[in-house]
Structures are given as structure tokens and as C-alpha cells.
């Protein structure tokens, strides 16, 4: 039966924190959550490093204009990396604290959701921009071919 006054509380919960039921994850569950936190942290670090390298390469667009695309993809990778580091920190809070596991888990899930949404939106935008670039290249080469004697 849910806690009094909170229809979403875990069965047998004595109270709630932030509208969430009370539940303490066991060692097995904490191990899975810690592993996920580690992977989210690793992906965040990889994204930031790759993003930083792409951003540095993007600043070479004065030498090679095509490298400007690296600047934008690098910034996006850094943003994605920071988002995943935030999710990893929240997942670690679930494992490293006592008494508010469900609230910490819900916060972690919100951050994972945000990180994934950033990645989804930027991937879609990147794909659309790539299609536009290909279409412009085709039009450019078609115009060049039709104007040559």
C-alpha cells in the first residue's frame, strides 16, 4: 500500500522526500547504478576530450576553411560531455547517500534524459545541415558544369 498522501510512494514507505517514496537500494542494485555512473562519467570525459580537440582543430579554419565545421561539432561534444558528467554525478549520489535514493535516482534520470535530448537534437541538426551542404554542393557542381564552354 502506498504511503499516506502519496499515491506514487513505494509500498511500505514511511514517508516521502520530494514527492517520491522512500527506498534504499541494496548492494546489487547499487553496483549496477555505480557501473552506469562510471560509464556515463567515461562517456562525458570522452566527449569533452574529443570536443576539445575538435574545437582546437576548428580554430584552424583560417588555414583550411572546411575545419570550421569542427568548431561547431566540438562545442556540441563538450556540451554533451558536461551533460553526461552531471548525470554521472547524480547517479553516484544514489549510491553514496542514504535515505533519499529514489529522489536522487529521479534527478539522475532527468539529467540522463536531458543529455540524451541534447545528443538527439544536435544529431538531427547535424544531419539536416549535412544534407543541405550536399544539396548545395550538387547545385554548385551542376552550375559549374552547365556554365563551362
Image (cartoon, helix red, strand yellow):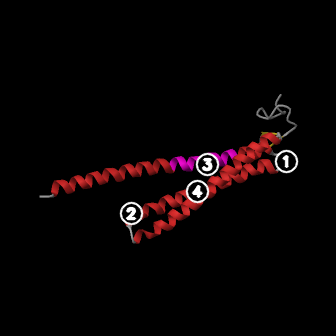
Q: Which of the marked residues, 4 or 2, is nearer the chain's N terminus?
A: 4
Horizontally, residue 17 falls left or right of residue 43, namely right
Q: Is 103 drawn above or below residue 60 in the view shown?
A: above
User: What is the total number of numbered labels drawn onto the structure image?
Assistant: 4
Q: Which of the marked residues, 3 or 1, is nearer the chain's N terminus?
A: 1
Extreme right residue here? 14
Q: Which residue is mark 1?
A: 98
Front tag of 1 and 2: 2
- Is the C-beta separation of discs 4 and 2 under 8 Å? no
Q: Which of the marked residues, 1 or 4, is nearer the chain's N terminus?
A: 4
Q: Which residue is mark 4?
A: 47
- Read off the magenta span: 107-121
Compute the Cα span from label 4 to label 2. Answer: 21 Å
The residue closer to the viewer here, 144 or 21, is 144
At horizontal 66% and vertical 50% (from top left) the residue drawn is: 40
Of helix, strand and loop, which mostly describes the magenta segment?
A: helix
Compute the Cα span from label 4 to label 3. Answer: 15 Å
Compute the Cα span from label 1 to label 2. Answer: 51 Å
Q: Which residue is mark 2?
A: 66
Q: Which residue is mark 3?
A: 114
Mark yes or no: residue 107 visible: no
At horizontal 61% and vertical 48% (from top left) the residue drawn is: 114
Q: Which of the marked residues, 1 or 2, is nearer the chain's N terminus?
A: 2
Residue 145: numbered disc: none
Amino acid at each position: 500500500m502506498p504511503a499516506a498522501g502519496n499515491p506514487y510512494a513505494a509500498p511500505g514507505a514511511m514517508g516521502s522526500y520530494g514527492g517520491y517514496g522512500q527506498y534504499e537500494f541494496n548492494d546489487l542494485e547499487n553496483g549496477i547504478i555505480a557501473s552506469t555512473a562510471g560509464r556515463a562519467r567515461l562517456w562525458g570525459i570522452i566527449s569533452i576530450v574529443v570536443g576539445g580537440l575538435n574545437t582546437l582543430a576548428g580554430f584552424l579554419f583560417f588555414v583550411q576553411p572546411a575545419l570550421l565545421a569542427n568548431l561547431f561539432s566540438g562545442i556540441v561534444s563538450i556540451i554533451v560531455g558536461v551533460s553526461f558528467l552531471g548525470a554521472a554525478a547524480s547517479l553516484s549520489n544514489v549510491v553514496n547517500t542514504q535515505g533519499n535514493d529514489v529522489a536522487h535516482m529521479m534527478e539522475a534520470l532527468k539529467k540522463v534524459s536531458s543529455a540524451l535530448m541534447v545528443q538527439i537534437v544536435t544529431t538531427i541538426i547535424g544531419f539536416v545541415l549535412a544534407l543541405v551542404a550536399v544539396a548545395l554542393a550538387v547545385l554548385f557542381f551542376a552550375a559549374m558544369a552547365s556554365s563551362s564552354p
